Each structure stands twice: as C-alpha cells, then as structure tokens.
Amino acid sequence: MQGLEGIKVPVHTSNQVCSIHGIHMVYSDRFPTPFCEKCQQEELAKTKKQFDRANTEKIARNDLKRLSLVDNHSEYKHTFDNFEAQDGTKEWQMKGAARQLAGKYYQEPHLNMNVIMYGTPGEGKTHLAMAMLNAVNQYSTPPQKCIFINITSLFLAIRNSFDNPMEKWTEKYAVRTLSNADLLVIDDLGSESAMNTSKGEASQFVQRILYQVTNKQHRIIVTTNLTMDELRQTYNPKLVSRLLAGSKGSQLDFSGIKDKRY
Ligand SMILES: Nc1ncnc2c1ncn2[C@@H]1O[C@H](COP(=O)(O)OP(=O)(O)O)[C@@H](O)[C@H]1O
Ligand SMILES: [Mg+2]
Ligand SMILES: [Zn+2]
C-alpha cells in the first residue's frame, strides 16, 4: 500500500465505504479508525495550498520593508494606534480623515485617488501617511503592494547610483518600482530641492522619475512641507497637476498643529 509520502504503510481494508469517493476505507494497527485515503490526500493538498497562500501573502506584505526607502527605520512603527489625538482637536480631525482615506484604498484596490498631506514640519504628516500604508498593507486580501519613498532618500540613492554600480536604486529601477506599487507614499516632496548642489540637475532627475511614475501610478499619498503654490514653483507645473489630479476631497491641510519634534 502506497502511503502519502511514498512510505509503505501496512493498512487493512475496512468494510466501510467513503460516502464521497465510494471507495473502501482503510485502517492500520496504529490508526484503528477507518479513513478514506482519497479524502486524506485531498485534505493534505488543501492544507498545503493554504500554507502556500499564507506564505505568498506574508512575502507580499514584507515588500513594504524590502522595497521602501525611509528616512529612519523607526518610521515603519507609525500606526493609527500610536498617533495620539484628543477628541475635537486638529490632530483628531486629520487622523479621522486619514483613516477614512486608508479605508477607501483598502476597499477599492483599483480606485484612482491621490492624497496630499501638507503643512509645516512636525505636524504628523509622515506618521499618518505611514499609518495609512501600514493599515492597507496589513489588512488587504489579496495583499496590495505598498511602498513608502522618502524623496530625499531616493534623491541620495539615485545620485549614488551615478558612480556606484552596487547601488540598486537606479533611475530605471525607481521608475519601475514606484510605478508597479498598488499604493505609494511619496514622503516629504520638495525636501530634496533644498539639497541641490548643482541647481536644476538634482531636481531634474527626481522630476524625470516622478513624471514617468505619475503617467501610470494613480494611487499616491504625498506629504510635503510646501504650499501648493511652492510646489508649482519647485516642480514642472504639469507634474504638479498630475500629482494633484484625483485629490479632490483628499487634500489634508495640517496647518495649525503644534510641532511634535523636540
Ligand atoms: N499626534 C501624534 N501622536 C504621536 N506622535 C506624533 C504625533 N504627531 C507627530 N508625532 C511624532 O512626531 C514626530 C514628527 O512627526 P512627523 O509625522 O514626522 O511630522 P511631519 O511629517 O508633519 O513633519 C514623529 O516621530 C511622529 O511619530
Ligand atoms: Mg514628514
Ligand atoms: Zn473519501
């Protein structure tokens, strides 16, 4: 008698017949309760499939940390749970709005919607953007590929790729990775413009990347310390309109919140 893993297991044929497969059940000295070998095989195949699916999902959910570029690794810990907000305050308003928008991304995986979170430093924009991404990443089934890109980190990585062949973040890799995400955070848009050593050139390759990405990617959460007018002065106006497109009703103004950094 051929066992499931190819091991010979001595079994005896029972009088009982499987009601599903219509074949005689078997039993052995170690397992005296008769069972159907076909049923057992199917059960095993089902368990294996569930295991494979769970594994695939786990790998997909790990893409967030595998593919993202954060300013600081502690930012992965930002969630709605650890965002403090007293009822009725501006923090509370922003948290509620961010939660609702995250719910939309979660419920409608193909919804084209950009979110702009703007204000001044330390107001919790990055925290809430990561909280939204973490929530969608954790709960979406099937998983949505969620990627967080701090724009200054991207700028530095790509600049590094110009003369370091080991750097994986080339312009081409960035365009592909950012375009293929199901949900993308672009954190601190405009911050890299302050790092221009040779003015123009730096923002040029970032702009070139963002221009190509926004051609295809319509689910972007942007955080920025620039005003909408400053954004238009910093970037190609056409790029800014693309980023703002589909953000009606999803532009969150954080101004008025006290700086949380000390
Ligand atoms: N309401 C909040 N509850 C808990 N931590 C907060 C809150 N707002 C901001 N922080 C923390 O303060 C720091 C600065 O916030 P951050 O989200 O980076 O601000 P911004 O992106 O607007 O400059 C982060 O460490 C963040 O986790
Ligand atoms: Mg920030
Ligand atoms: Zn059976």
Image (spheres, rainbow, N blue to C red):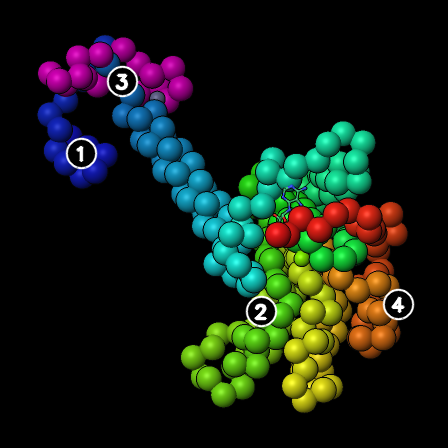
Q: Earlier in the sequence, mark 1 or mark 3?
A: 1
Residue drawn at the location 13% of the way across and 28% of the way down? 9
Provide the secondary structure element on which disc 4 rests.
helix
Could you tell me if the residues under marks 1 and 3 are in contact, i.e. CB atoms within 8 Å? no
Q: Residues within 10 Å of mark 4 (few under 14, many from 20)?
A: few
Q: CA distance from mark 3 to mark 2?
A: 60 Å
Q: Is residue 113 left or right of residue 261?
A: right
Mark toward the viewer: 3 or 4: 4
Residue type at mark 4 is Asp
Which residue in the structure is indicated by mark 3? 35
**Residue 141 spot, x, y in % from top left:** 58, 40
Q: Earlier in the sequence, mark 3 or mark 2?
A: 3
Mark toward the viewer: 1 or 2: 2
Residue toward you, 119 or 168: 119
Q: Is residue 56 above or below residue 222?
A: above
Q: Is residue 39 left or right of residue 232?
A: left
Residue type at mark 2 is Ser
Residue drawn at the location 53% of the way across and 46% of the way down? 77
Which residue in the structure is indicated by mark 2? 153
Mark toward the viewer: 1 or 4: 4
Q: Residues within 10 Å of mark 3 (few under 14, many from 20)?
A: some
Provide the secondary structure element on which disc 1 rests.
loop
Residue drawn at the location 62% of the way across and 63% of the way down? 150
Q: Residues within 10 Å of mark 2 (few under 14, many from 20)?
A: some
Which residue in the structure is indicated by mark 4? 229
